[in-house]
Amino acid sequence: MNKKGFTTLALNIPYPKADPHRALQMPVYETVAFEFDSAEQIEANFKGEYIAHVYSRTSNPTVEYLETKIRTLTGSFGVLAVSSGMAAITNTMLSVCKAGENFISGNQLFGHTYALFSQTFADLGIEVRFSDLVSPEETEKLIDKNTRAIYFETITNPQLHLADIEMLSSISKKHNILLICDSTMTPPNVFEAGKQGVNIEVLSATKYLSGGATAFGGIIIDHGNYDWQINPCVSEYSSKFGKGAFIARLRKNIYRNTGTSMTSQTAKLMIQGIDILEIRVQRCFENCLALGEFLLTHKKVKRVDYPGLENHAQYLLAQKQYRGIPGTILSFDLETKEACFAFMNKLQIIRRATNLNDNKSLIIHPYSTIYCEFSETERKEAGIRETMLRLSVGIENAGDLIADISQALE
Ligand SMILES: *Cc1c(COP(=O)(O)O)cnc(C)c1O
C-alpha cells in the first residue's frame, strides 16, 4: 500500500510511456490520430490484441495520464475523463440504465442534473424517482425489479445537506443495485468514496480539479466494487472484460458514440490543477472556517450554514465522511432580499458569479438566479430562502475577505 501523502503522490505518478526528452511535465499530445507500423498492427489493434491510441475521441495519451493520476490517487479500479460534469453524469447513467428501467435520485440536485433527469431522461424512457434519501424505509419503498441505482450528491448546494452514505450503501447492497454519487463538492483528497461503499463516482472537474475555473471537464470513477454481471446494460461486457465491464461499455459504446471526450489541452490544465489540489482545498477550508466564525458573531447576519462548523446539525457526519472538510461553500442569511443585494453590490474582493470552487471567492443570491424559474412552493421545498446568500470561498487571504464582508455589511 502506498503511504505517501496526496500531494507527494500527485506529483510523482509516472507517465504511461517514457518521454524521449524526459520532460518534467506530461506533454500535451494535440493530435487527432496515431500512426501504425503495418496493416497487421492496425488489424491487431482493432481486434483488441495490440493496445495503442488510435483516435483522440476514444483515447489520448495526455487524457490517459490524467485518468491514471486520478485512478492512483483514489485507489480506484478505472477512470474515464469526459468533456464536462454533465457529460460524466449522462455517460454514467446511460451506461447502466435504459428505457423502461429506473433509478432513484436525491431531490436536492445541481440544477442541470435535475433537468437532465426530469426532462431529458424522461423523454428517453428512463424514469428517475426523486426522494430526499433521508429515511431508509421511504427510500427502499421506491425500489422495484427495474431499479438500477441510487444516485446522490455528497453535499447538496446551496442547502449544504450531507447524504448519509453508510445508510445508502446498506440499502444498495441489500438490493444489489448501484450506489452512484456526484462528489463535486468533496474532492478526492477529502473523500474516499470507494471505501464508503460508493460504486461509481462522478464529478465536475470544472470546479476544484481544474485549478481555478480554467476549463470544463468531468470524471467518472469505477471503484471496482460492483459485480457487473448483475446490471443488464453492462453484463454483456462482463464475460469479455470482467471487472472492466463498465469502463468497456463506456469506451465501446456511450462515451465513444456520443463524442463527449476531453481534449488534451484540458487534460493538461486538470493535471496541473490536481498537483496543487490538496493545498488549495486546505486554504479554502481555513478561509471558510474563519469566515463562518466571523459571520456567526455579526449582528446583521441571521443564520450561517456550514457543516464544518460545530454548531451545524451534521457536523459529526462531516467529520466521519469528509475528514472534517465538507466542501468549502457556506451560506448565510441577512434580514431581507434587499439587504442581500445591497451587500453583494458593496463587495470589492468577493466576485458576483455563479461558479463554485474557483480560486477566487464567489457570491450569488440563489433565490433570484439559480432558482428564478421555480415557483414559491418549489423554492420552499428546496429550502431556498429569499434572504440566503451562497459563498464559494477561495484562496485569498482570510483577513482581506473578512474586511471585505465587514465593510459590505455596514
Ligand atoms: C457544476 C456541477 C455539475 C456540472 O458540471 P459541468 O462541468 O458544469 O458540466 C454537476 N454537479 C455538480 C454538483 C456541480 O456543481
Image (spheres, helix red, strand yellow):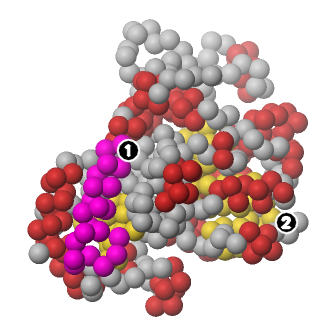
* Residue 169 position by quadrant: bottom right
Q: Are marks 2 and 1 in contact (CB under 8 Å)?
A: no
Q: Nearer the viewer, residue 277 or 62?
A: 277
| Residue with the mark numbered 2 | 146
Considering the image in quadrants, where does the C terminus appear?
bottom left
Tag 1 secondary structure: helix
Near mark 1 (Cα within 10 A), the count class, few <14, some 14-19 or many ≥20, is: many
Tag 2 secondary structure: loop
Residue under the image location 73 percent in, 15 percent down = 40
Q: Pinpoint residue 79: horizontal percent, then vertical percent.
A: 61, 37
Q: Pinpoint residue 176: horizontal percent, then vertical percent.
A: 84, 54
| Residue with the mark numbered 1 | 281
Residue under the image location 18 percent in, 65 percent down = 405
Residue under the image location 62 percent in, 55 percent down = 181
Dot in front, 2 or 1: 1
Q: Is mark 1 within 8 Å of ligand 1?
A: no
- The tag on residue 227 is none
Residue under the image location 16 percent in, 73 percent down = 409
Look at the image and give the residue range highlighted in magenta: 281-304
Q: Pinpoint residue 256: horizontal percent, then vertical percent.
A: 64, 44
Is 107 on the left or on the right of 66, as rendered?
right
Is 192 on the left or on the right of 308, as rendered?
right
Inspect the image, locate mark 2, and give the three-letter code of the amino acid beneath it. Answer: Asn
* Residue 276 position by quadrant: top left
245 is within the stretch colored magenta: no
